[in-house]
Amino acid sequence: MQKWIESAVAAQTRWTERLFSLKVEADIAFEAGQFAKLALDVEGERLARPYSFVNAPDERPHEFYYVTLPDGPLTQRLCKLQAGDRVYLAPRPAGFLALSEVPAGENLWLMSTGTGIGPFLSILKTAAPWQRFKQVVLVHAVRRAEELTHRESIEQLMRKHGEQMRALSFVSREAAAGALPGRVPAAIEEGRIEAAAGVALSAEKSQVMICGNPEMVADTSAALARRGMKKHRRRDPGQITVENYW
Ligand SMILES: Cc1cc2nc3c(=O)[nH]c(=O)nc-3n(C[C@H](O)[C@H](O)[C@H](O)COP(=O)(O)OP(=O)(O)OC[C@H]3O[C@@H](n4cnc5c(N)ncnc54)[C@H](O)[C@@H]3O)c2cc1C
Ligand SMILES: NC(=O)c1ccc[n+]([C@@H]2O[C@H](COP(=O)([O-])OP(=O)(O)OC[C@H]3O[C@@H](n4cnc5c(N)ncnc54)[C@H](OP(=O)(O)O)[C@@H]3O)[C@@H](O)[C@H]2O)c1
């Protein structure tokens, strides 16, 4: 039987109608990019799902960034929690979307849709990407401009890291100032993403981490494969490291 850590909600932020950040106090260690299992008791059963840490490993409280699904058994309950409410965490975080899994390269691309930006914010708040890569590009693709959350954290990172960091936003379902239109795979195919970042995207120079919508992960991986890039495996090194959220 898995033992659970009983934790208290520190705060809940509502970014949009459907996007939330749950902050949780818990004594749990993890590597940036990993996820924890969050759980609630529902009708006598412990209902658990994985969520990526958004905070850096040395920051507290922990932050989990999630989207509520209309009939989602856990997210419909998580979004009702308030400071002081109880939530359970599985004691051992897991996952391979961590920089320790990524080989050396000249530049690092972090490509996300929706809440998939979370683990990349955690990674960017650590020293490792800045020590290991000459340039780091954060890509966040959403449907609507209001879903471009965590702007303050991103701006803080940009101020801290200057020319070493680039941040690109995609907004696909409305025109948005400062954001690229459309989807990430098409922008890769058309060379628009490199032009916007001013950073090379190639098998020789780049490592790419991708997180979020599994169709976006697949289509982006395919667009990168057409540029000679392949999935990274410990025994067969490549350039692409991914995590699917569903
Ligand atoms: C490794 C990993 C890390 C994850 N980290 C996060 C995270 O940081 N933030 C987050 O919001 N979710 C994350 N998820 C998804 C999360 O675990 C839940 O599946 C999600 O919150 C839905 O839970 P639910 O019980 O409300 O609905 P479920 O019954 O679990 O989901 C209903 C259906 O919705 C779809 N779905 C699941 N998650 C999403 C999603 N995020 N966006 C769109 N459709 C989805 C799936 O098709 C699923 O079958 C992660 C999943 C994995 C595997
Ligand atoms: N956001 C909402 O208002 C809303 C409303 C109702 C339900 N939902 C549900 O909530 C969940 C999460 O929604 P979300 O908006 O966070 O995430 P999402 O549907 O994954 O959309 C995020 C971004 O990913 C893009 N995308 C989708 N498929 C792609 C692909 N194959 N290749 C490249 N890019 C792709 C979307 O572009 P496109 O816009 O071109 O698809 C959008 O820009 C989904 O299950 C969705 O059905 C969301």
Image (tube, rainbow, N blue to C red):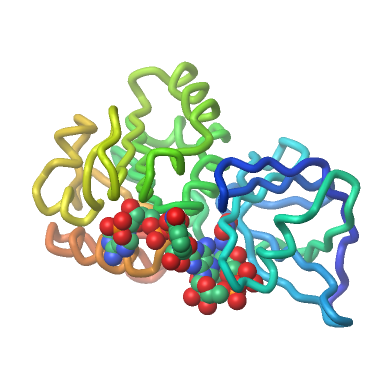
Q: Is residue 101 left or right of residue 138?
A: right
Which quadrant of the figure shows ligand 1? bottom right
Residue at image position (30%, 38%) is 107
Asked if residue 34 lies left or right of residue 235, the reply is right
User: Could one spot residue 239 in this view of the protein?
Assistant: no
Image x and y of residue 192, in percent? 14, 41
Q: Residue at x 35, y 32 (%)?
A: 167
Question: Is 189 on the left or on the right of 5, as rendered?
Answer: left
Out of 113 and 198, give the one closest to the viewer: 113
Q: Is residue 112 above or below residue 150?
A: below
Q: Where residue 28 sits: x, y (%)? A: 79, 52
With 189 as the anchor, is 149 left or right in this view?
right
**Quadrant in the picture for the N terminus:** bottom right
Towards the viewer: 73 or 190: 73
Q: In which quarter of the view is residue 145 placed?
A: top left
Whether residue 163 is visible to the viewer of this picture, yes or no, is yes
- Give the number of marks: 0
Q: Quadrant of residue 230?
A: bottom left
Choose between 149 and 214: the one closer to the eye: 149
Residue drawn at the location 43% of the way across and 22% of the way down: 158
**Residue shown at 66%/64% (left/top)?**
75
Q: Position of residue 7 (x, y in %)?
A: 88, 54
Q: Is residue 181 above or below residue 89?
A: above
The image quarter in which residue 76 lies: bottom right
